[in-house]
Image (spheres, rainbow, N blue to C red):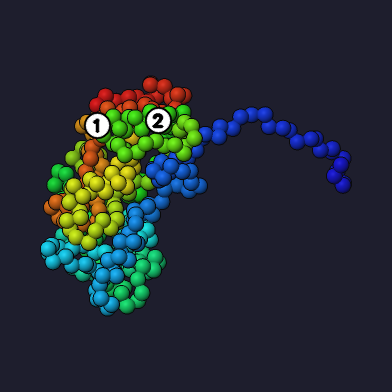
Amino acid sequence: MIAGDDVELQPARSFHGHIDSGWWMHSFSQLRDERRADSDDVSGADDEIADADFVATAESDVADGADLTHIVDESLSETVPIWPSGAEFGTALHEILEHTDFAEWRDHDGNVPPESQHLMMLATLRRHALAPPERSKELLRIVTSLIAATLNVRLPDDLRLADLALSERRAELPFYFAIGNADPARLLSLLQEHGYQRRRMDFARLHGRLSGLMTGIIDLVYCHAGRWWLVDYKSNLLGARLADYTPAALNRAVHDDEYDLQYLIYSVALHRWLRQRLGSAYDYERDFGGACYLFVRGLRDDASHGVHIDKPPFALIDALDRLLTPASITPADREHAHG
């Protein structure tokens, strides 16, 4: 009895239901690292891989007091910035690209950002404390050059991101899509049948079948000339030379860091969204442009360096979609569009 109350408390009820311990919030990072984490993917946070070791080695080869922004290889006239680097820099760069006015950067050429973007960039860089005060101008100059290159590089259909209207793009697009009782071994088999993830042996640490939600954040989704594209900005330091950002070098980096797994997950998410949005009018081959990964340190206006583009085959995206779809969702629910 509770003092002052004439109602007797009943014994607590026992729970006899079943909680599916296999249900989880999955993401690219978790699949890549073969582990479960308590947090979702964070934009920009996983872009930098082993950069610190590269910078430490490079800086040790330069005399004290020298400008460490670039390492000059006499056999190659063009180099790329090696400073700043790290996950915090990647996050700051993503924040600037999320909030900047693309149109203000059209044909931008200079050491400082467009006047309308200056305060936002300064505030973002200061918040992340990427440089001591004596190097703040140098930092702003480098970031300005990277943002200008990113928004003016020539992409498919002769498009520059700076030419996109606000209504044609969406920055930092989060997604969640349902997955249910999918076999990790079958997932890997599908990827390898189509030439992806050839070096991976398994997803051993998943402990059973995939179930729950897949989540992630796509840096940019845009529509141009009737086709939808997903874009990811990578600030990875692949080397100090422009030659480290050729298509062949980027292909190696994408496979080494398993970014192909990332954009396949993103492609399934965008594929499902387009099918839901456009219904029976949606056609993958016609409407889906592909994945465009921009390695910002090595970008050149003509897209000869720093740009990795891939359009996964419809057969793979369709098979992944079917594999990951929960059994409770019927074919009619999916409104499957033929590619």
Q: Is residue 288 above or below residue 163?
A: above
Question: Secondary structure beneath disc 1?
Answer: loop
Task: Tell me the residue at 50%/47% (across/down).
Answer: 38
Q: Quadrant of the C terminus?
A: top left
Q: Quadrant of residue 330?
A: top left
Q: Could you say which is closer to the camera, residue 101 or residue 297? A: 297
- Residue 313: give its label: 1
Q: Could you say which is closer to the camera, residue 5 or residue 197? A: 197
Task: Tell me the residue at 50%/38% (across/down).
Answer: 24
Amino acid carrying label 1: it is Pro
- Residue 148: give its label: none
Task: Tell me the residue at 72%/32% (across/down).
Answer: 14
Q: x, y (%) of residue 187? A: 37, 31
Q: Are marks 2 and 1 in contact (CB under 8 Å)?
A: no
Question: Secondary structure beneath disc 2?
Answer: helix
Query: In the rendered picture of this protein, how many numbered marks are placed on residues?
Result: 2
Q: CA distance from mark 2 to mark 1?
A: 20 Å
Q: Is residue 117 above or below residue 9?
A: below
Local packing at callout 2 (Cα closer than 10 Å; few below 14, some 14-19, many 20+) is some
Q: Which residue is mark 2?
A: 185
Q: x, y (%) of residue 104? A: 22, 60
